[in-house]
């Protein structure tokens, strides 16, 4: 019997219990899934970083901690976590992110906000450019960034991607390092942020990098709130350097009611809805990793502690 402990907020148990049990059965795993195993008996922990479980010292038998979130920045620095840590790469979450990013990219590309708000009775047809005439840059070429970039390229957009390490993706102009970042930003009429939150990416978009964008660029951030220097973005919006920003993630969530983003006419706020882990598909990812762990096979989506993701 494989002992699996579920360590997340109580409402998540109600969402995940049945899908996890179904996934374990589908993968032929004999699992005792509980909220309250004795720590020394636990083989795997299904985990969310906002769980009450923050000290892993007693989990001496645990073979892996399987994160329910794509982001792991809230747990990688925990010195008691010595077990292998796997982040969530959920096909349902990825599809949700692709749909959200594609929708807002097309919204900006076709200037849909203008036509929705253009109710003055003036007939002024302006034909939007084709996707092949629009430059889109995606910062971050992990699972989510690659999926979004390739989808946008399939629609005809000129897509440039930037990552901290060199990548090769068919149909995407891939850049890396500091010089590559400047080049990626310099052509970005629509900029999409899908980088992890690490010390190297905090405030990556600041006054200097915002000035590298073409005047009137639009920004879409479904990645991480700390990627953007908020004051610098507000200044760039006020000067017209940035035409508009759609923000789904923030340094403090929920976004405080008195935050300037709420009232700013050039900002669209969405409440961290770009991508959500789907219980059915995520449960199968968890089950597959437990199957691998029991079979002695490499775990999927293992976190690089030094890189932070």
Image (tube, grey):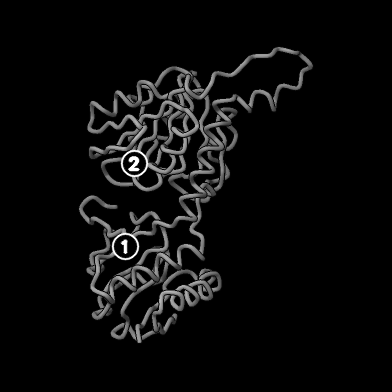
Residue 137 location in percent, x, y? 39, 30
Residue 30 location in percent, x, y? 39, 84
User: Which residue lies at the image location 23% right of the left edge and 65% below the top edge?
Assistant: 79
The CA span between labels 2 and 1 is 18 Å
User: Which residue lies at the image location 38% right of the left edge and 21% below the top edge?
Assistant: 187
Front-most of residues 219 and 51: 219
Name the image quarter holding residue 8. bottom left
User: Which residue lies at the image location 28% right of the left edge and 77% below the top edge?
Assistant: 294
User: Which residue lies at the image location 56% right of the left edge and 37% below the top edge?
Assistant: 103
Identify residue for label 2: 141
Q: Earlier in the sequence, mark 2 or mark 1?
A: 1
Q: Is residue 133 left or right of residue 77?
A: right
Quadrant for the N terminus in the image = bottom left
Identify residue for label 1: 86
Q: Say what secondary structure mark 1 lies in.
A: strand
Front-most of residues 118 and 258: 118
Front-most of residues 113 and 78: 113
The residue sitting at the right extreme is: 121
Image: 171 above or below 98: above
């Amino acid at each position: 019997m494989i002992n699996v402990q579920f360590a997340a907020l109580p409402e998540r148990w109600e969402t995940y219990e049945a899908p996890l049990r179904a996934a374990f059965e589908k993968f032929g795993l004999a699992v005792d899934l509980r909220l309250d195993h004795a720590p020394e008996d636990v083989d795997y922990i299904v985990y969310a970083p906002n769980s009450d479980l923050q000290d892993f010292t007693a989990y001496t038998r645990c073979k892996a901690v399987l994160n329910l979130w794509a982001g792991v920045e809230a747990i990688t620095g925990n010195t008691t976590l010595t077990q292998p840590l796997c982040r969530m790469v959920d096909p349902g979450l990825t599809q949700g992110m692709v749909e959200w990013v594609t929708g807002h990219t097309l919204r900006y590309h076709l200037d849909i906000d203008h036509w929705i708000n253009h109710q003055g009775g003036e007939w002024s047809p302006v034909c939007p450019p084709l996707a092949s005439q629009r430059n889109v840059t995606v910062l971050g070429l992990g699972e989510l960034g690659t999926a979004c970039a390739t989808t946008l390229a399939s629609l005809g957009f000129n897509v440039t991607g930037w990552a901290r390490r060199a990548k090769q993706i068919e149909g995407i102009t891939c850049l890396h390092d500091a010089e590559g970042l400047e080049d990626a930003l310099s052509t970005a009429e629509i900029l999409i942020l899908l980088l992890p939150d690490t010390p190297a990416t905090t405030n990556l978009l600041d006054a200097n990098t915002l000035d590298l964008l073409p005047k009137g660029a639009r920004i879409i951030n479904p990645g991480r709130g700390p990627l953007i220097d908020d004051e610098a973005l507000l200044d760039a919006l006020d000067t017209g350097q940035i035409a508009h920003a759609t923000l789904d993630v923030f340094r403090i969530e929920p976004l405080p009611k008195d935050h300037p983003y709420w009232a700013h006419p050039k900002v669209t706020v969405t409440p961290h809805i770009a991508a959500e882990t789907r219980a059915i598909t995520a449960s199968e990812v968890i089950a597959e990793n437990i199957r691998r762990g029991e079979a002695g096979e490499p775990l999927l989506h293992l976190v690089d502690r030094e890189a932070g993701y």
